[in-house]
Image (tube, helix red, strand yellow):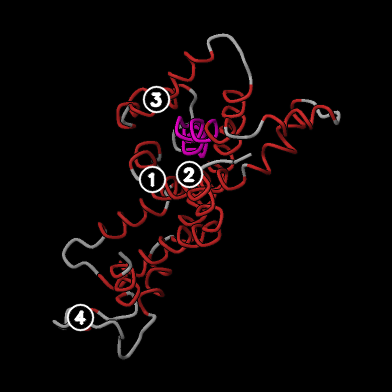
Amino acid sequence: MLLPFIYMFCLSFMTDSQIFAGNISFLPSPMTTDNYKYVINNADIFRYFYNSMFVAIATTIGQVIISAMAGYAFARFEFKYKELLFILVLVSMMIPPQVNIVPLFFIMKQFHWIDTYWALIVPGLFGGFGVFMMRQWFKSMPDDMEASAKIDGCNTFEVFYKIALPLAIPALATLAIFTFITTWNSFMWPLIVTNSDAMRTLPLGLANFKGSFREITDWGALTAYSVICCIPVIGVFILGRKYFINDILSGGIKE
């Protein structure tokens, strides 16, 4: 699984003549950084990188907060039509996202959000998977912890903020990783709701960068661009891997 990524990283330091030499080499000789210089000088990569990072971070924070609150409400509260609403959340997970593109586009158009950060961020704040995941985690939380906190004088919000959220850090980190990677790699939705070059994200910039070469594709520069696109998601996974693994192994809190 790692081999293509390692090879892509090595190709980014090769010239075209080395890439098409006919033999697979993981150690370019000589090694060159011209591909990265070319990408920086010929593509507005800093703007694309900023857009992707801003949208991914804002969407991740928003979805984690909303999913945690909704999941806690479904797990610990009793209210009218609770089961029906939760079934609707599960149903939303079964609908392909492509089905929602047209109506969602017209909603963004009515709000005059086309070609703005709002259109890139707001639709990603709500997700059935995140609500379902957090609901399952909070349902596994022992009732005694919540009861003890209320005896000590905590209100509902304090129980959620001081007790439930710290215990749910592995699940929150896992949801954050999934959301960040999904948003960072998103191509179709940003392509539809952005018109100007200033609002493009890195995946769109990568497609434009490849498309700018009509006859000859500069594969060295293209792999350098791809490496830059991969670095943030790899970094996010490395930073959160401990919580991610703990969440998978534990599967919930045991009393």
Residue at x 44%, y 50% (from the top left corner): 181
Of 139 and 69, nearer the camera is: 139
**Residue type pointed to by label 1:** Ser
Q: Residues within 10 Å of mark 1 (few under 14, many from 20)?
A: some
Circle 3: element type: helix
Mark before the other along the chain sequence, 3 or 1 = 3
| Residue 206 pos. (x, y %) | 34, 57
**Residue type pointed to by label 3:** Ser
| Residue 107 pos. (x, y %) | 43, 23
Figure check: 18 above or below 245: below
Of 79 and 211, nearer the camera is: 79
Taking 193 as reference, is 47 left or right?
A: right
Residue at x 48%, y 57% (from the top left corner): 49
Taking 140 as reference, is 209 left or right?
A: left
Figure check: 154 above or below 202: above
| Residue 247 pos. (x, y %) | 52, 48
Please tell me whether mark 2 or mark 1 is closer to you in this view: 2
| Residue 96 pos. (x, y %) | 31, 30
How far apart are the alpha carbons under marks 2 and 3?
A: 16 Å
Question: Which region of the structure is painted magenta?
Answer: 116-135
Q: Residues within 10 Å of mark 2 (few under 14, many from 20)?
A: many
Q: Which residue is mark 4?
A: 24
Circle 1: element type: loop
Q: Which residue is mark 3?
A: 92
Q: Main secondary structure of the magenta part?
A: helix
Quarter of the picture containing the N terminus is bottom left
Residue 186 disc label: 1
Of 19 and 137, nearer the camera is: 137
